[in-house]
């Protein structure tokens, strides 16, 4: 699908939804996977939408709907959602981390989303935890946090060890085909006492803790909100990582931080984009008032 037809589809859907409740559109927010240039309203590149390189999605939807559009990276939007309406509500400095097939996130500093110069801040998953040539990361580098601690990383590590001849009940769970291993089977096998599964989870969770300690020392957040599929394994996977993080971070940072599971589920990106759109609409009204004609006397 071209960016033009996607823009038309987004605009049509937005119009239909708003007309169904007899409303009008004042502004809209789009949460998109990938690197987003918020100033230009473009998706610079997206691993899930590889055909979209420098795609002016925000700009196009804005010209169709004729209202301000906020185009935001989905993890950044999720951070805004959790901060404004979810587990980080009331905090001023918050990290949102999503751990599933990859690791992503966003950072709220003094109640504002920290976007960086071009809107690319928060690529936590591609900070390097193990400097070396392995394990490979989908970004083209190696030793990244998500290559060590995501669900995909766990499945890959188990697969490699099974292919190297190690024995584990995981092999039965996937019908004898190592290529079918996902993090789900690894957690199931670990719960049943499987040695290989527990070793892999212990290692991935340890690296998760190392990365969290880095975030604590760099950002000194009040709250770290953790979402994504792996957050459902809180006791087995997240808790041990928090212990490592608190041991490794400076005492000031480790003793004061609160870790919370995300509250808004898969909707947190949408809710955050909506919140940002509301802000844009308010700003727009305020600037229209300022630059508008003086009231008649
Ligand atoms: Zn990477």
Image (cartoon, rainbow, N blue to C red):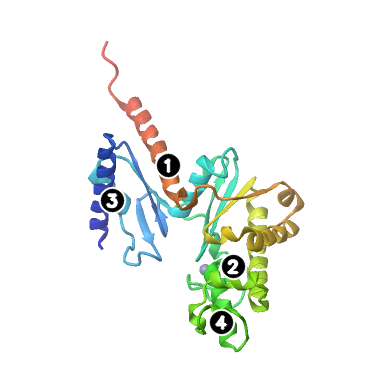
Which residue occupies 63% across, 69% down?
204
Q: Is residue 143 left or right of residue 277?
A: right
Residue on which disc 2 sits? 149
Residue on which disc 3 sits? 10
Instruction: Tell me the quarter of the image containing the C terminus.
Output: top left
Pointer 3 and pointer 1: residues touching (CB < 8 Å)? no
Checking the image for residue 276, the label placed there is 1
Task: Judge the density around disc 4: few (<14), some (14-19), many (≥20) Cα neighbours within 10 Å.
Answer: many
Q: Nearer the viewer, residue 133 or 73?
A: 73
Which residue occupies 44% across, 54% down?
74
Tell me the quarter of the picture where residue 27 sits: top left
Residue on which disc 4 sits? 171
Instruction: Tell me the quarter of the image containing the N terminus.
Output: bottom left
Asked whether mark 3 lies closer than 8 Å to ligand 1, one says no
What percent of the width, then of the height, locates residue 175?
A: 50, 82
| Between discs 3 and 2, the one toward the N terminus | 3
Residue at mark 3 to residue at mark 1: CA–CA distance: 17 Å
- Could you tell me which secondary element the residue under label 4 belongs to? helix
Q: Is residue 176 visible?
A: yes
């Amino acid at each position: 699908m071209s960016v033009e037809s996607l823009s038309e589809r987004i605009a049509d859907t937005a119009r239909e939804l708003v007309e169904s409740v007899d409303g009008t559109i004042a502004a809209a927010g789009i949460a998109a996977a990938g690197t987003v240039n918020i100033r230009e309203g473009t998706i610079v590149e997206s691993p899930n939408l590889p055909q979209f390189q420098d795609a002016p999605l925000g700009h196009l939807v804005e010209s169709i709907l004729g209202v301000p559009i906020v185009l935001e990276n989905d993890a950044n939007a999720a951070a805004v959602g959790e901060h404004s309406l979810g587990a980080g509500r009331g905090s001023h400095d918050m990290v949102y981390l999503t751990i599933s097939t990859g690791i992503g996130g966003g950072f709220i500093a003094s109640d504002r989303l920290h976007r960086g110069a071009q809107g690319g801040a928060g690529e936590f998953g591609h900070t390097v935890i193990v400097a070396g040539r392995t394990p490979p990361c989908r970004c083209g580098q190696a030793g990244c946090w998500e290559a060590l601690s995501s669900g995909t990383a766990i499945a890959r590590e188990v697969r490699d060890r099974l292919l190297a001849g190690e024995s584990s009940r995981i092999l039965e769970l996937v019908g004898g085909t190592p290529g079918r291993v996902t993090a789900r089977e690894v957690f199931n096998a670990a719960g049943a006492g499987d040695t290989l599964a527990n070793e892999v989870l212990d290692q991935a969770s340890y690296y998760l803790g190392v990365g969290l300690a880095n975030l604590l020392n760099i950002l000194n957040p009040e709250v770290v909100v953790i979402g994504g599929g792996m957050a459902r394994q809180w006791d087995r996977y997240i808790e041990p990582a928090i212990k490592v993080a608190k041991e490794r971070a400076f005492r000031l940072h480790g003793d004061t931080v609160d870790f919370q599971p995300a509250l808004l589920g898969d909707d947190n990106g949408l809710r955050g984009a909506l919140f940002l759109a509301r802000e844009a609409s308010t700003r727009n009204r305020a600037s229209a008032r300022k630059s508008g004609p003086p009231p008649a006397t």
